[in-house]
């Protein structure tokens, strides 16, 4: 196992566990807050489970990475001053809120 690949084992295990423990499955709406390495992996793992994922982050580069991985249906810049109600209204299914939120 290469050191590059081995370095992802622990963060990937965290992402897998988070998605499994939170009950994410096909058609679950999921908001992921924070797009560091684990947040990006959470986006991908949740999308592989069939979830509709909305990523929320500050960094333009990390939001671009989430989009380029094909793991999210939308990316939200949390520095735009949107409050929780605005995010729910604009990005959650029928504005009702998300089934799962992971920070």
Image (cartoon, rainbow, N blue to C red):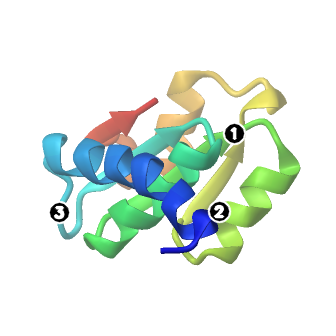
- Asked which secondary structure carries label 1, the reply is strand
The span from disc 3 to disc 2 (Cα, nearest Å) is 19 Å
Image height of 88 relative to 74, above or below: above
Of residues 37 and 61, the one drawn nearer to the viewer in this rendering = 37
Q: Residue at x 60, y 64 (%)?
A: 3
Residue drawn at x 72%, y 32% is 78
Specify whether 93 is left or right of 81. left
Q: Is residue 87 left or right of residue 59?
A: left
- Which tag, 3 or 1, sits closer to the chain's start? 3
Give the distance between the C-alpha atoms of the residues marked 1 and 2, in whole angstroms. 10 Å
Given residues 69 and 9, the one toward you in this image is 9
Does dot 2 land on a helix, a strand or a loop? helix
Q: Quadrant of residue 47?
A: bottom left
Q: How would you rate the neighbour count of disc 3 (Cα within 10 Å): few for under 14, some for 14-19, many for 20 or more?
A: some
Residue in view at x 57 percent, y 73 percent? 2
Give the residue pinned by disc 1.
Answer: 57
Residue 44: x %, y % from top left: 46, 66
Verify CB contact (< 8 Å) between mark 1 and mark 2. yes
Q: Quadrant of residue 22?
A: top left
Q: CA distance from mark 3 to mark 1?
A: 23 Å
Give the answer, above or below, for where 54 lies relative to 1.
above
Residue 7 in the image, given as x and y percentages of width and height: 55, 55
Determine which of the numbered discs, if any, sits on residue 25 in the image: 3
Q: Residues within 10 Å of mark 1 (few under 14, many from 20)?
A: many
Q: Is residue 49 left or right of residue 11?
A: left
Q: Which residue is mark 2?
A: 66
Question: Picture coordinates of residue 58 (x, y %)?
Answer: 78, 36
């Amino acid at each position: 196992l290469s050191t590059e690949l081995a370095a992802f084992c622990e963060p990937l295990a965290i992402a897998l566990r988070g998605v499994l423990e939170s009950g994410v499955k096909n058609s679950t709406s999921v908001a992921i807050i924070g797009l560091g390495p684990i947040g990006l992996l959470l986006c991908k793992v949740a999308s592989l489970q069939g979830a509709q994922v909305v990523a929320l982050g500050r960094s333009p580069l990390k939001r671009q990475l989430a989009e380029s991985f094909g793991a999210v249906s939308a990316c939200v810049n949390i520095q735009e001053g949107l409050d929780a109600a605005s995010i729910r209204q604009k990005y959650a299914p029928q504005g009702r809120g998300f089934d799962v939120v992971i920070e």
